[in-house]
Amino acid sequence: MNMPYQTGDTAFVAEASAFTQTSIPCPICFGKLSVTLILGNGESQTVECEACGKGCYGPTGTASVYKATSSVRRITITGVMEDGWEDRWIVSEGHSTYRLSDGNVFPAEAEAEARRAVLMAEAEKQAERNMESNMRGHKKQMTWSANYHRQEIARRKREIEWHEARLAMKK
Ligand SMILES: [Zn+2]
């Protein structure tokens, strides 16, 4: 297999990521910091928003999510190599390595831009899927929390009733 690049060549690398962290207004509570669940019996229950909650700090109205980003990077090749599986790699300054079989390295910028568009579309789909499953998880969590707090309230009410009954007996 011949290596199309040589040390000292310029190349263009297309890259995309679905995991660039960003802050957005909370898509679950829309900044209200709480949401209302409608229970099976029609009763409403307001609970703290878990989608923008940050541990013990409580809801903030701002959710931290991942979004897709992409770029085309111009690199100068500082080395070329072949691994044990006969896959060819190039090395750029900063010791980043790129596997040529990934198909993201190009000699011309325009080709890299075309590839970037494809990668970006994939990353956007991935980011959307992540966001959806993330938000589904938050909704489930809130239902669980509402149930937990209701059960705790019911349990403590029974305890109070028991203590009140004991006091009444002593009169
Ligand atoms: Zn929220």
Image: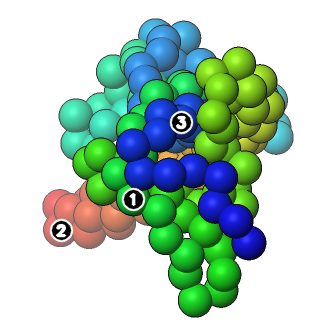
Residue 24, given in percent of the width and then of the height, sits at: 48, 16
Q: Residue visible at 46% across and 28% down?
A: 74
> Residue 60: image x %, image y %?
33, 21
The residues tagged by marks 3 and 1 sit, at their Cα atoms, a distance apart of: 12 Å
Task: State yes or no: Cβ of the residue under disc 2 lies below 8 Å from any atom of ligand 1.
Answer: no
Q: Earlier in the sequence, mark 3 or mark 2?
A: 3
Note whether 48 is above or below 141 in the view shown: above
Q: Secondary structure at mark 1?
A: strand
Of the residues shown, which amino acid type is indicated by label 3?
Ala
Report the residue that reaches farthest toward the left: 171
Viewer-proximal residue, 154 or 135? 135
The quadrant in which the N terminus is found is bottom right
The quadrant of the image that shows the C terminus is: bottom left
Q: Residue at x 55, y 26 (%)?
A: 72
Q: What residue lies at 75% left-to-right and 32% top-to-bottom? A: 115
What residue is pinned by disc 2? Answer: 170
Local secondary structure at mark 3: strand
Q: Give x and y (percent) for residue 159.
A: 34, 64
Kind of residue indicated by mark 2: Lys
Q: Nearer the viewer, mark 3 or mark 2?
A: 3
Q: Which residue is mark 1?
A: 79
Q: Which mark is residue 42?
A: none
Crowding at mark 3 (Cα within 10 Å: few <14, some 14-19, many 20+): some
Residue of label 3: 11
